[in-house]
């Protein structure tokens, strides 16, 4: 069994390497893709600056606090995109009948599909988010203790698990409906836009949803409360210290649902 898993891991990294080499064949497109993503998120930051230049603060959050909140979400999303962006189009493989090939090769179907593409365009998101976090840290005059650095790293890792889990969960819908990508755009795009701003801007029902059902709040908002010494009228900022645990648990649930869908998969025969 151990030899099987070791062989599977070696195959996984070989497939990731092949994906990267394939994308590097067109160097201009490769670098423009990275630059394009970085500029796209920079444009959102400029929009925040324009808005805050008039209002000075939004729900008690200053411009650089909002930039930190935004960049923290983008940082974990960038890692998620590296490994899981193509899960949103899994329904196309099911409809076309090409998903069958992931079931007949000596690699776990989930990891095989995961290794099919390593989206290097996400480096643009990582480039922007790391730079934004560093600049916001300096502008806000932060001086974190070792414990707070641990909270920050846990928030990034937890954010990766949470956002990846949601992508995996949405892709699993295709096992029952044969369609899932439209649901991705209906759920993920609005949710990611809402994560750019403090949770207190939204109705209580949405706050409750983003904490207890689809735990987006653990990606950036709750950890940011703790890291920036801010308060929420109801929820403790110390909840942000368990982002990693919440992320691991949530991803495991989403993965089990994906595996349940796989057990019910029937080829379309296309």
Image: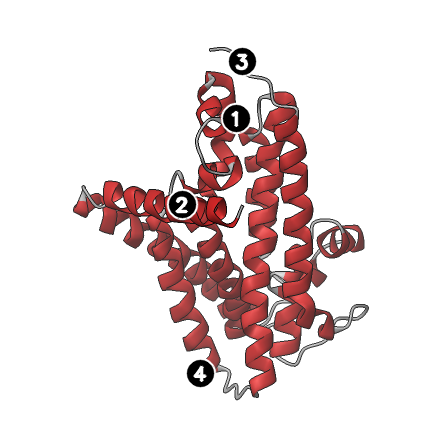
Q: Residue at x 71, y 62 (%)?
A: 200
Of 86 and 43, which appears nearest the observer?
Answer: 86
Q: Position of residue 204 (x, y in %)?
A: 79, 55
Question: Residue 148 bears which disc, if any?
Answer: none
SS of the residue under disc 4 = helix
Mark closest to the chain's N terminus, 1 or 2: 2
Question: Residue 91 bears which disc, if any?
Answer: 1
SS of the residue under disc 1 = helix
Give the spatial CA distance, label 2 vs label 4: 39 Å
Q: Specify whether 57 is left or right of 203.
A: left
Q: Nearer the viewer, mark 1 or mark 3?
A: 3
Q: Position of residue 8 (x, y in %)?
A: 44, 44
Which residue is tagged 2?
Answer: 12
Q: Nearer the viewer, mark 1 or mark 4?
A: 1
Give the spatial CA distance, label 1 vs label 3: 11 Å
Q: Nearer the viewer, mark 1 or mark 2?
A: 2
Which residue is tagged 4?
Answer: 138
Which residue is tagged 3?
Answer: 268
Tell me if label 2 and label 4 are in contact, CB under 8 Å.
no
Compared with residue 153, is residue 160 higher up or lower down, i.e. above or below? above
What crowding class fits label 3: few (fewer than 14 Cα within 10 Å), some (14-19), or many (20 or more)? some
Mark closest to the chain's N terminus, 1 or 4: 1
In the rendered image, which quarter is residue 152 located in?
A: bottom right
Q: Specify whether 119 is left or right of 204.
A: left
Give the spatial CA distance, label 1 vs label 2: 22 Å
Q: Residue at x 49, y 47 (%)?
A: 5
Give the spatial CA distance, label 1 vs label 4: 44 Å
Tell me if label 1 and label 3 are in contact, CB under 8 Å.
no
């Amino acid at each position: 069994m151990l030899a099987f898993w070791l062989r599977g891991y070696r195959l996984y990294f070989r497939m990731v390497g092949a994906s990267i080499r394939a994308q590097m064949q067109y160097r201009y497109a490769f670098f423009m893709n990275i630059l394009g993503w970085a500029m796209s998120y920079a444009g959102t930051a400029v929009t925040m600056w324009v808005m805050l230049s008039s209002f000075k603060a939004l729900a008690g959050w200053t411009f650089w606090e909002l930039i930190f909140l935004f960049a923290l979400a983008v940082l974990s999303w960038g890692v998620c995109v590296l490994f899981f962006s193509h899960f949103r189009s899994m329904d196309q493989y099911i409809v076309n009948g090409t998903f069958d090939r992931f079931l007949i090769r000596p690699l776990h179907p989930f990891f095989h599909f995961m290794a099919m593409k390593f989206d290097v365009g996400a480096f643009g998101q990582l480039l922007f988010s790391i730079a934004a976090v560093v600049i916001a840290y300096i502008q806000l005059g932060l001086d974190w203790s070792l414990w707070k650095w641990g909270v920050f790293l846990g928030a990034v890792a937890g954010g990766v698990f949470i956002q990846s889990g949601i992508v995996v969960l949405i892709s699993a819908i295709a096992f029952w409906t044969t369609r899932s990508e439209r649901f991705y755009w209906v759920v993920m795009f609005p949710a990611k836009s809402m994560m750019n701003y403090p949770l207190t801007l939204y109705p209580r029902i949405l706050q409750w949803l983003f904490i207890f059902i689809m735990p987006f709040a653990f990606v950036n908002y709750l950890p940011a409360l703790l890291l920036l010494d801010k308060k929420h009228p109801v929820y403790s900022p110390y909840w942000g210290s368990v982002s990693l645990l919440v992320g691991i648990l949530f991803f495991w649930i989403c993965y089990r649902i994906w595996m349940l869908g796989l057990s019910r998969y029937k080829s379309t025969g296309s």
